[in-house]
């Protein structure tokens, strides 16, 4: 991962949330882990919560079972707080980019779509490090975490781009997720990806 860091760094992860029911689970494990825990990394999308058909949002969720049988979840996405019109103009190139940040995600809708990858410990930790490495490199983990600020553009550095990069770190280099369409919204893209992984009936 080589994000363009605009200013301070932080990553806010949320634990203990309840994962929305997955639409598909894909097992990419190739061995048994010696700690007996299960791990999964999910590509998730939800419809826009706002009016006027505004675009939705994609993010990545990390889940790990605990020895007592419960699960812990962390979720993170790349988003922006810039004005909507400025963000939309990044599609056109009139504004090349707007301020963005990595931040915590909370499962807020039963309509969320998730493609869940069951993974081994090593790739799980590698993918989680992909998310946390900017923070770990620049901040003392015992200090409060300011936002991880990144450039954001709907033409290339948006929520889908970020989520796909994380998931592709888990997959064989010759079998990445399918490319996103130029104007494909997050939920439409994730639904299409789920369909490509669904075995024929």
Image (cartoon, helix red, strand yellow):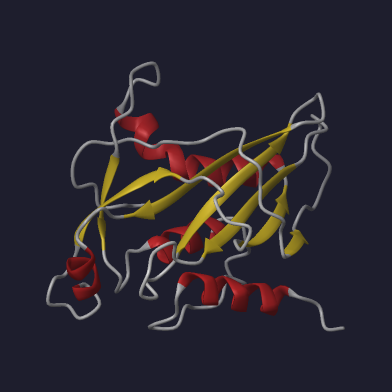
Toward the right, the furthest residue is: 201
Write the residue at 39% across / 71% down: 55
Where's the C terminus, which quadrant? bottom right
Q: Is residue 137 above or below residue 88?
A: above
Q: Is residue 181 above or below residue 87?
A: below
Residue 120 drawn at (x, y percent): 72, 45
Residue 95 drawn at (x, y percent): 13, 71
Toward the front, the furthest residue is: 51
Which quadrant of the view contains residue 182?
bottom left
Residue 42 drawn at (x, y percent): 62, 55
Write the residue at 77% across / 52% down: 29
Which quadrant of the view contains residue 143?
top left
Write the residue at 33% across / 21% down: 144
Which quadrant of the view contains residue 114?
bottom right
Most foreground residue, 42 or 50: 50
Write the residue at 38% across / 54% down: 78
Most foreground residue, 77 or 177: 77
**In the image, is 110 to the left or to the right of 184?**
right
Residue 125 drawn at (x, y percent): 59, 39
**In the image, is 193 to the left or to the right of 77?**
right
Most foreground residue, 145 or 22: 22
**In the image, is 196 to the left or to the right of 183?**
right
């Amino acid at each position: 991962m080589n994000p363009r860091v605009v200013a301070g760094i932080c990553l806010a992860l949320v634990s203990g949330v309840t994962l929305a029911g997955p639409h598909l689970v894909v097992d990419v494990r190739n061995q048994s882990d010696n700690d007996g825990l299960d791990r999964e990394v999910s590509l998730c999308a939800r419809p826009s919560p706002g009016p006027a058909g505004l675009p939705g949002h994609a993010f990545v969720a990390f889940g790990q079972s605990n020895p007592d049988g419960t699960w812990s979840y962390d979720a993170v996405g790349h988003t922006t707080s810039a004005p909507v019109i400025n963000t939309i103009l990044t599609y056109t190139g009139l504004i090349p980019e707007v301020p963005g940040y990595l931040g915590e995600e909370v499962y807020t809708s039963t309509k969320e779509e998730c493609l869940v990858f069951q993974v081994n410990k090593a790739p799980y930790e590698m993918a989680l490090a992909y998310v946390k490495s900017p923070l770990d490199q620049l901040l003392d983990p015992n200090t409060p975490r300011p936002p991880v600020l990144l450039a954001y553009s709907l033409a290339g550095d948006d929520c889908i781009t970020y989520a796909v990069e994380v998931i592709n770190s888990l997959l064989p280099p010759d079998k990445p997720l399918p490319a996103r369409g130029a104007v494909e919204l997050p939920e439409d893209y994730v639904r299409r990806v789920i369909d490509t992984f669904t075995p024929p009936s």
